[in-house]
Image: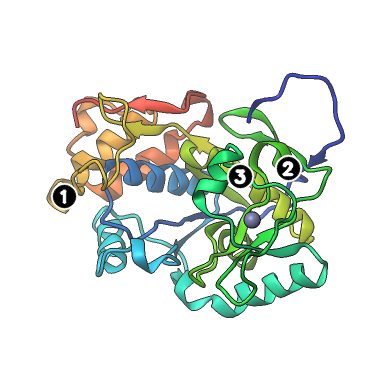
Amino acid sequence: MGAASAAPNITMTAPAPKCPYIGRFAPSPSGPLHFGSLVSAVASYLDAKAHNGTWLVRMDDIDPPREMPGAADLILQQLQQHSLNWDGDVLYQSQRSGAYLATLEKLQHKGLVYPCQCSRQQLKKQGGIHPSRCQLKDPSAPAALRLAAPAQSQIEFEDIFQGQQRQNIKHEVGDVVLHRKDSLFAYQLAVVVDDAFQQISHIIRGSDLLSSTPRQICLQQLLGLLTPQYGHIPVATNPDGQKLSKQNLTPSIDAKTASANLASALRWLGLPLPKARYSASSHELLSWGIEHWQRKLISPVMEKVTFNR
Ligand SMILES: [Zn+2]
């Protein structure tokens, strides 16, 4: 996908939701917060609070094999240590299976879901894009459930930071998995169900999720749900160009240096934090950030190298 520029086509343009502003930060507990995830948390927090909005935290703990025991609690603790205090209760995806199942059944009743036993190798041969329908090798063996993407699945939306976006789900993504062969619900389904349940109006998150946004909008449209406004901030990378993550041994943020961590995050987000304020408390830094937050300071690039952390 990419910035829209080509000739007009039949499109499913995402309608903007009505206010009030409800934002969210939805970490996966695959490890503690690192600088990259702190930046996402701060950006979504500041954008919500600068618009007098509500800021929710949701734990995307839908994939136990990828999770680290204790990480969910640790992340919440780290947020509080940085004065990133959320509104309301934390929602845990691990407790939402009933809602995901009900939504899956809704799509099944519309005839939009079919089973698939394709292997990774088979998918690779198709360039990773699953075609419409496929043959079941063994009807009694486990199968994933895929969404039959509509033929007219050109999705367009205006990203707050990245501008106009366009993607054809059928041709660029294929039929996505909603329920995995290992019986877990897929992230794409869960995130759409929960964003609607929490009435999220604005989603500010890392640009690594930009390419999966159109398929979430497609699902919202098939389910008759409103589409939030999306804003994808650049992903923090190390000087080697790798996204900061547990996999490349990015260290956890240290609560002992909460103010310095926040000062770095504010500067990284383009805010002109004066040097004299670097040693202010977490609370003061966030208040300053709310006052000075400007969306236009975020550059429309997908990645940004992190130096001098
Ligand atoms: Zn298949």
Foreground residue, 110 or 17?
110
Q: Secondary structure at mark 1?
A: loop
**As shown in the figure, which amino acid type bears the numbered disc 3?**
Thr
Image location (x, y in percent) of residue 212 = 58, 44
- The residue wearing badge 3 is 213
2 and 3 marks in contact (CB < 8 Å): no
Where residue 170 is drawn, which disc sits there? 2
Foreground residue, 180 or 224?
180
Looking at the image, is mark 2 or mark 1 earlier in the sequence? 2
Q: Is residue 98 above or below residue 263?
A: below
Ligand 1 in which quarter: bottom right
Point out the frontmost of discs 2 and 1: 2
Q: How many marks?
A: 3
**As shown in the figure, which amino acid type bears the numbered disc 1?**
Asp
Looking at the image, is mark 1 or mark 3 earlier in the sequence? 3
Foreground residue, 269 or 150?
150
Point out the frontmost of discs 2 and 3: 2
278 relative to 19 in the view: left or right: left
2 and 1 marks in contact (CB < 8 Å): no
Other residues around mark 3 within 10 Å, as few (<14) / some (14–19) / many (≥20):
many
- The residue wearing badge 1 is 254
The residue sitting at 55% across, 38% down in the picture is: 210
Locate the C terminus by quadrant: top left
Locate the N terminus by quadrant: top right
Q: Is residue 11 above or below residue 20?
A: above
Residue 64 visible within the image: yes
Task: Choose top left, top right, bottom left or bottom right for residue 35.
Answer: top left
